[in-house]
Every structure is written in structure tokens, then in C-alpha cells.
Amino acid sequence: MALISPSFSLSSISISSKTTPSSLSFFLPRRRFLLRPPPSSSSYTVRAAATLDSGNGSVVADNPNPNPNEVDYGRKFFPLAAVIGQDAIKTALLLGAVDRDVGGIAISGKRGTAKTIMARGLHAILPPIDVVVNSNSNADPSCPEEWEDGLADRVQYDSSGNLKTKIMKSPFVQIPLGVTEDRLIGSVDVEESVKSGTTVFQPGLLAEAHRGVLYVDEINLLDEGISNLLLNVLTEGVNIVEREGISFRHPCRPLLIATYNPEEGAVREHLLDRVAINLSADVPMSFEDRVAAVGIATQFQEQSNEVFKMAEEETELAKTQIILAREYLKDVTMSREQLKYLVMESMRGGCQGHRAELYAARVAKCLAAVEGREKVNVDDLKKAVELVILPRSNIQERPPEDQNQQPPPPPPPQQNQDSSEQNEEEKEEEDEEDEKDEENEQQEDQLPEEFIFDADGGLVDEKLLFFAQQAQRRKGKAGRAKNVIFSEDRGRYIKPMLPKGPVKRLAVDATLRAAAPYQKLRREKDMQSGRKVFVEKTDMRAKRMARKAGALVIFVVDASGSMALNRMQNAKGAALKLLAESYTSRDQVSIIPFRGDAAEVLLPPSRSISMARKRLEKLPCGGGSPLAHGLTTAVRVGLNAEKSGDVGRIMIVAITDGRANISLKRSTDPESITADTPRPSSQELKDEIIEVAAKIYKAGMSLLVIDTENKFVSTGFAKEIARVAQGKYYYLPNASDAVISAATKEALSTLKNS
């Protein structure tokens, strides 16, 4: 359900569930902004009639109707002023509107939690911007040092000698999941290059988003290369393009807003670390709020204009107050003691690096600017910790005994003394000291009385524990590079590259861009051929393709002993269950039973259920236990599958009791074993298996050991195998195929997200 409400207030953090127009409140404090002008002496004039509008932020023509809410066709986005709940997220969005350099906002949440609604609703409250005419990247007239290359030669001046500018709507650019690198950063304009005979740069989405909002929906599904490139440009604040004969740079400082659903995949931890505010939309709602949300959502579907009218006044007020807050922000100061407080909170929360306190300091200043103050106060510091540091922290939950400790007993009552004169004098002195303390507090730095985190990294305020736990669940691992396979022949086209040898798949777009600047010259050299396009071998570019990489699950099953048939049946059932779900995941399954003197590949890597059923009709059992050869065979099968280019992750599932009585030499070279050859000792067999387990870890494969040993005669060696291979261990002596399949799925999911 979308969490939508007719009212919210960023200053008071209060929610109203009434759906009357009079209850609409945009959360913005009004008392200071309406009482005095901003500290700067600059004057602002907004020419609404000249406002330009575009769906993706690229401005091409005047819009006769400057109000986007009055358009009679097309999609209309729900106003932010009508969203119920989500106070922290709405506060963060307002701060981002005030200061685009705040560091970005990431919003996680399950389906229907109004993530996209709030992100798009911010666009309506952004004030218009003044840009230089003929600028490709929304250049700011007041910052000529940040103009893109070549703009100084294209600027125009009026009759009075003033620089020509235009007022346009703040851009709101959405990055699609399938965006290519060329569309993102810019590339050669083929048409203009062919006409002029020179290389002409065509700006990308990053240029269009400058000084506006750059929105990425489902950032967890965005290509890793694109996301890394995107964050690098946003961190630097400038996009430098050096490719295909282009050398161009332009400013790029938009507000990044990213949303994602953690159920569809976690976001890499280093990615979230580079975004200032990471919040979750999965907050509990009261019954009244849910009723109000359904009511206002239904009203918006049936009578959207009525909802826009309800929010119109607050939206216009928000635009004005954001402009004023931007002016206040220039003069907001933070003392060294307040900065020390933020650093200490970051250290107590276990935050890595310095980004937490840097972003928190910026957020605290923005909060002061929204309130119309020139100094950061206690509430600003606390809110900054909650928005920035708390989601990044590693919470150490306090033990129950600490929470249930009784407060210390009160001190014994003092004896009454008949000294009324002394008491009066003491009261007078205390009153004087209190007055002095109040004066000093007003002059000195305002600091919170206590830290949000205690010395052990736990939360002092237990009400914030749920908020922190939501942030912990969203964290992913460092990267998932092995989940994608790159090639030149199969997959999705992601970027062009210079060919290495023969071109398998020609990148027509990149080839034409490379050839475009030379068309005029080549036509002049070959006037008689009549060809329209001249492409030479040096212009050719190959496609770099990427496709989803499946995982290979190799079941290594102990088929020796009396319980061998049960183990083989369970492995067969688990393999068939995984194959039934392999269509979407592209996972493959292999089964290697080991018995007698050696292991054999009963089912080679496959996604075919029919092939698996046919090969697993007869299950060989009985004989010795060559565990070392079974693990070695699994490593060899995994390496061969990895070379084929269809497998990214490999997991070996060993179903065994950890006992072995056949050496690796006897399995691999049985002719060298004679009757006089001494039998290997138990320790030698264990050392051999430990060596193979270490090779599994070095080969980059994951090991899952399912121990089927009887506890009464247990040696614990199966657990030692898992430890050496840095794998997982489960003791499941009587596990069914469903239990083994569930354990394998869990380990495989962890592997893919690692």
C-alpha cells in the first residue's frame, strides 16, 4: 500500500490523518522566513511565464502552461504534501531540495511503500533555475568557472551587454536500468558530426540532470559498471569524457535519489556508503493512517485535480522557503565542539571511514537553514545523527541484565537545620548562578546532554533500535562480479570496445560515431563511388555483451556403507528440486557419488530435468569411501564448467560422515598399488582430505558440508573440512531431500549476494 497522506510537517514531525483541505501542511516552518529577509542582499525575480518544461529535464521550447499539475493529459504524479507518514524520508527529501550537495538519498522498502511516489513528488516543490542560453548542461550564470567546455564562445548578450539567460524548471532525470555508458555520460553526435566534418559532442543524461534531481529506481538492479561510473561522477562534481576522439568536460552536481526493494537483491555496501542518507520506508502504520492513505489515494485516482488543489498552496510555499533556506545555508556555522560530538557519535556507532561525520555535518547545517537559523543547535545535531550516522552504525544490542538493572537507591534525607538565613543566602546565590548559566548557554555552543550511542556501541534510546535494525537488514556485500559473464558473442549489449581480433558482433552505433567526423573528408577523396557512408576497418567497434551467470551446484555424495542408498536418494531429490527452479536462475546441477576405489560423475553439469532423471535411475552404492577423490573430482568439474563461460559461482555440497578409507593415490593410479603397498594411516587420509579442502577455497569455490555421521561415534572431522575450506557446516543425520534442498538454497543465495 502506498503510504500517502494529506499532511506533514518537517519541523514538528507531526502527522495529520484528516483528509480535509484545511489540514494540508507542508512541514515547513514559517515563522522565521516570513519575519525577516535572508542575510544575503541579493534579490530574486522568478519569471514564471518563461518557465520551460520537459519530461526528462532537457529544455527545448517555451511551455505556455508553466504549472505541470494543470496538464490535461499524461501521467500525473502524486504531490509530496499528501503523503502519510515517512517523516524521516520527507525530511531528507526537503534537505536535498535545499542543498543538492548534501550527498544523495537512498530509500529502501518493500512493494507499495511510496518510495517512487515520494521521489517523484519532490520534483513539484523544486524552484525553477536560471541557466545560460545555449548551455548543454544547465550552466549557472553566477558560476562561470563551472561552465562546460566551449560555452564561453557560444554565450549571447542583449543590447545592454547583459548575459542572456532563461528560467527553466528544475530537471528531473530518471536513469533507466538498461542505460548504456554512451547515453549516460554522452557520446558523438553522429548527425552533426557528418554535417560538420568534425567531432561533435552529444550530452548525456548526466548533463541534463545538472542542478536538478537524478533519480535511479531499483538501483540494486543497475549494472555494476554503470553504478560505479555514476557515483564517481557525482562525487567529483564534473563529468570528464575522453573517448572516440572527444575531450569534453561539464559540471554534474544533481541531487541523487535512489530507491530499491531489498527483497529483489541487496545493494552493495560500498555503494550505500557513498550516499549520505540511507533510510527505510518499511515503518509500521497505525490503523487510522492506513485508512487515510486509502482514502486520499482513491481520491487521487478519481479526482486528481482536487488533490492538487489541496496541495497547491503548500507546494508554492515550499518553493519559496527552499529558495530562502538556500540563502541561509551560506551563513550557517557549526562550532568545533559540535563537530567533535558528531565524530564521537560516529566512533561509538562503529562507522567506517569519515563519510558519516562529513555527511552528518552537512545535514545539520541544512536543518538549521530550513529553520532559518545561522547556528546549528541541539535538535539539528540529534536529527543529523538519526538520518546519517544511525543507518551506517553497527548496533551492539545491550544485554538484558544491563537493561533490567534497578536504579540506585536515593540518598538519605539530610538533617533539618535551623539556619533559615543561610538557606535564603544559598537560594539567592543559586538563582544568580542559574541566571549566569542561562546567559552562558545562549552564548556557548549548544550540545546534546547525552550521546545517542553508549560507549559499547549500543543505543541509549531503545525507540531507535527498530530504525537501526531496518538499516542493518539492507546492507549487502562488497560486490557481485561473478553473477555476470562478459563476452563478445552472447548476452545484452552494454558498451562498445575496440576489437581484439576478428569482430564477432559489430557495434553499429559506435562504429558510425567513430566514422562520422571523417565522412566529409572521405567523400571529397572518393567522389565517383556514390557511396553515402564510408566506414573503414579502423572505425569498427565490437560489442561487449553481458549475460546473467548461473551457479553450479555439485553434490558430492558418500555412496559407501549401509546408509548410502538413503543419502543418494536424498541427493537425487534435492538435485531435482533445484533443477525445477533453474529456468529463471540459470543454475546447473551435477552429482558425483564416491564409493569403492574412486568417484564418478554420475550427472555432468546440466539444467535438464529429463537428463537428470534418466541418469539417476540407477544409484550405485556400497564399497569403500574415497572422499578425497570425490572432492578432487568436484573441483575438476567446477573448473571445466567455469572455463565454458556459463557459470559464475560454484558450490560443492558434500553429503558425508567425514570418514574415508581409500587414499587419493589408489583412486587416481590404481596400477601403482600392489599387495605389498602399506595401507595409509587414518591421519594420512585426513591430511590428504584437508589439503583438498584448502584447494577448494583457493579455487574460489564454496563448500557446504552436510554431516550425516552418528553422534555416538562422531569424530567431528566433517566440521573440520568445512572450517578449512571456509565453508558452511550442517549436522543433519536424518535429513530428507527437502531439508537438503532448503539448506543448499540458503547457502547458494548467500553465495550469490557475496
Image: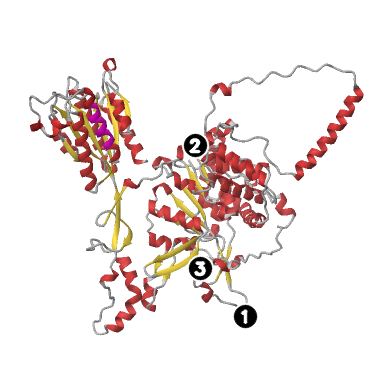
Query: Given contact means CB atoms under 8 Å apart, are the residues at marks 2 and 1 in contact?
Result: no
Residue 653 picture location, percent across and down? 26, 32
Crowdedness near tag 1: few (<14), some (14–19) or many (≥20) residues, C-alpha within 10 Å = few
Magenta stretch bounds: 685-695
Badge 1 marks a residue whose secondary structure is loop
Q: Does residue 395 appear in this view?
A: yes
- Which residue does the image show at 22% across and 26% down from the upper left? 684
| Amino acid type, callout 1 | Ser
Give the Cα distance between marks 3 and 1.
Answer: 25 Å
Determine the residue located farthest toward the top in the rendered image.
Answer: 712
Q: Main secondary structure of the magenta part?
A: helix
Q: Which mark is residue 470?
A: 2
- Which residue does the image show at 17% across and 19% down from the upper left? 562
Q: How is the image coloured?
A: secondary structure
Tell me if residue 553 comes above or below residue 511 in the rendering. Answer: above
Q: Does residue 175 appear in this view?
A: no
Is 480 included in the stretch rendered in magenta?
A: no
| Amino acid type, callout 2 | Gln
Residue occupied by mark 3: 148
Give the Cα distance between marks 2 and 1.
Answer: 59 Å
Residue occupied by mark 1: 159
Crowdedness near tag 2: few (<14), some (14–19) or many (≥20) residues, C-alpha within 10 Å = some
**Quadrant in which the C terminus appears:** top left
Residue 215 picture location, percent across and down? 48, 53
Residues 361 and 279: in front is: 361
